[in-house]
Amino acid sequence: MVIGCGGGISVLISDALDSAGLSMARLESGTLSALEQFGACCQGIGRYRQSDRDAG
């Protein structure tokens, strides 16, 4: 398990990668900020896809 500066999210990501047989380097400073931005993008995509499902 890799624990970086991101705390809980780092553990979740590293556990998921480990269970898939993958590995990752130790998370560095700024990782949590980058993941938060990425998460916001994913949420936007999720809302967009849900509206497509609702319309079709």
Image (tube, rainbow, N blue to C red):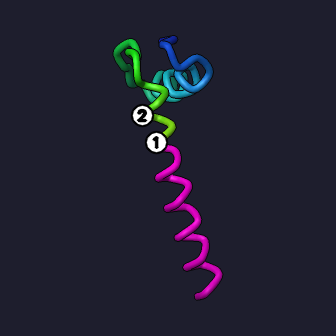
Report the residue at 51% width, 44% height from top: 39
**Which quadrant of the structure image shows residue 11?**
top right
Residue 1: percent from left, percent from top: 51, 12
Amino acid type at circle 1 is Gln
Q: Main secondary structure of the magenta part?
A: helix
Front residue of 19 and 40: 40
The quadrant in which the C terminus is found is: bottom right
Front residue of 30 and 49: 30
Label of residue 14 in the image = none
Graded by Cα atoms within 10 Å as few (under 14), some (14 to 19) or many (20 or more), the crowding at tag 2 reads few
The residues colored magenta run: 38-56
Q: Name the residue under label 1.
A: 37
Report the residue at 46% width, 35% height from top: 35
Report the residue at 51% width, 25% height from top: 19
| 41 within the magenta span | yes
Tell me the SS state at disc 1: helix
Residue 36: percent from left, percent from top: 51, 37
Q: Do the residues labelled 2 and 1 touch (CB within 8 Å)?
A: yes
